[in-house]
Amino acid sequence: RFGGLFEDTHQKRRNCLADVRVGTYAYDQVQEGGLHDNRRELESYGYVELPIGGTTEGLQHGLWRLTEARYRESLDALLQRKSIELTYKNPHAALKSFQRTAGRDDIRYRELPEVDRDAWREFVLKVSREMKRYPALKNGSVKLTARNQRRTFVSSEGHRLVDGTAYWSLEFYIWYLSDEGESFPLARSFFVTDPTELPDMRRAKRLVRKVHDQLALLAKAPAIRSYSGPVLLEPRAAGLLVHEAIGHRLEGNRLLSPGEGQTFRDSVGEQVLPEGFNVWDDPSMDRWGEKSLTGHYAFDDEGVESQRAKLIDNGKLVGFLTSRSPTGKRHKSNGHGRSRYHARAMSRMGVTVMQHDAGLSDAKLKEAFLEEIRAQGVPYGIRVLDASGGETSTDNYNFQAFLGQIDFASRVFPDGREELVRGVDFVGTPLNAIRGILAAGAKLHIDNAFCGAESGDVPVSTISPALLLSELELQQKARRPYARFAYPLPWA
């Protein structure tokens, strides 16, 4: 932070998810797709961490203690399930509880790269020092995280699987405070599996300057409170829409839970997007062009090989992301059962791709946007230049809605003029939003990030074009101006 080293740590950990099932493949203790099998108050949660060295007896004892606790918890869960079904009807009684698979060996052991700690320590110090040049930057940091992850999967079915991946993340956090007390926090992250893709020193310093200049312009831009009308989502923002409005609602395990909204349950074979749109998820891909994909994995957390899952074909819904929890009588997992730490695996996204058969050039997409603005007779449309995060609710207790956090946006007038605006995020309900999609760009953008859901935080990749929507709603961001600081910055 500002040229000072705030944290420098190295950690080695080993943890284990013991999936102990009691009963039979046709009927075991897991209910509602396992969406709620992530409780931290269970005894087994305290045994998830295992020894990282020493004798094998220590590791064996840790595995024994964890498995013993999980077995007793599973027996209790089976009795609870039988008790619940005395009162409530199970709508999926005809489905088996778990898909049987044949064991296999796939050992991909390899040494993962070492981290040059001295070089990276110097890097973050020098780049963060660059922030001292700008008095309006009241807070900020540069952080490198390198994680060498080795996954081992063994099962009573005969699986012996080993794979390793290195994840590198370089994060910039910049907090700009205007003279009026308005704060503008912005995070920029480079999340890759190949460290050569990370920015070098010169590029990183340029990024700090660029973000400062962008935030200075944003601070002077007019604020808007709300909006509903035509919107052009640039690729990164469009990827958020794809992830939140479509992706989470195509996770098959949600079809097994009566507490889920199940937006697309009865839509297989129906047109859910305009013709020409295709969506699939393929975590077996480790690169797209020259860029690495953090959503890649060789096998999922149920021992199934990663593979391509076709979701939407020419605008029609054709399938779901599936794990080994059957969602139909002819069920077969497509290798998307994923979990983190102690949570039970459920179907999750890996590398999600949206593409149009005839995507438009940037110029033609902009012209289509202007034509839509004129056709609707609105004073302007909104172009979302960048967005950095989102969230959605899929359960039927809450509203079926999603939100995308806008970093930069502009309003576009019918004559093509653009003006930077601030203060809003895009929101909507999934069906209305995707039915409003009119066109897509030809260029695709890769966004590597972490996705959080019931089974934990897992790395994902979203590849998306820009999207033109006939209507999308924007709402005001949370806003609370700051009082002027009592003391000047030490170097001011």
Image (tube, grey):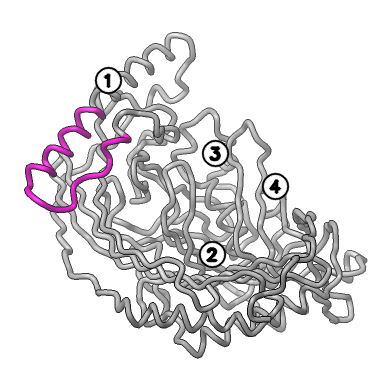
In 3D space, how far apart are the residues under numbered discs 4 and 1 (Cα atoms)? 40 Å
Foreground: disc 4 or disc 1? 1
In 3D space, how far apart are the residues under numbered discs 1 and 2 (Cα atoms)? 43 Å
Q: Name the amino acid type tagged 3.
A: Arg
In the image, which residues are magenta? 45-70
Q: Quadrant of residue 308?
A: bottom left
- If you read the primary sequence from the N terminus, does the residue marked by circle 3 or circle 1 appear first? 1
- If you read the primary sequence from the N terminus, does the residue marked by circle 2 or circle 4 appear first? 2
* Residue 185 relative to residue 299: left or right: right
The tag on residue 429 is 4
Question: In the image, residue 245 lies at what x, y percent?
Answer: 61, 51
- If you read the primary sequence from the N terminus, does the residue marked by circle 1 or circle 2 appear first? 1
- If you read the primary sequence from the N terminus, does the residue marked by circle 3 or circle 4 appear first? 3
Question: In the image, residue 393 lies at what x, y percent?
Answer: 61, 42
Residue nearest the viewer, comparing 407 with 332: 407
SS state under label 2 = strand
Q: Name the amino acid type tagged 4.
A: Thr
Q: Which residue is mark 2?
A: 354
Foreground: disc 3 or disc 4? 4
Q: Name the amino acid type tagged 1.
A: Leu
Q: Residues within 10 Å of mark 2 (few under 14, many from 20)?
A: many
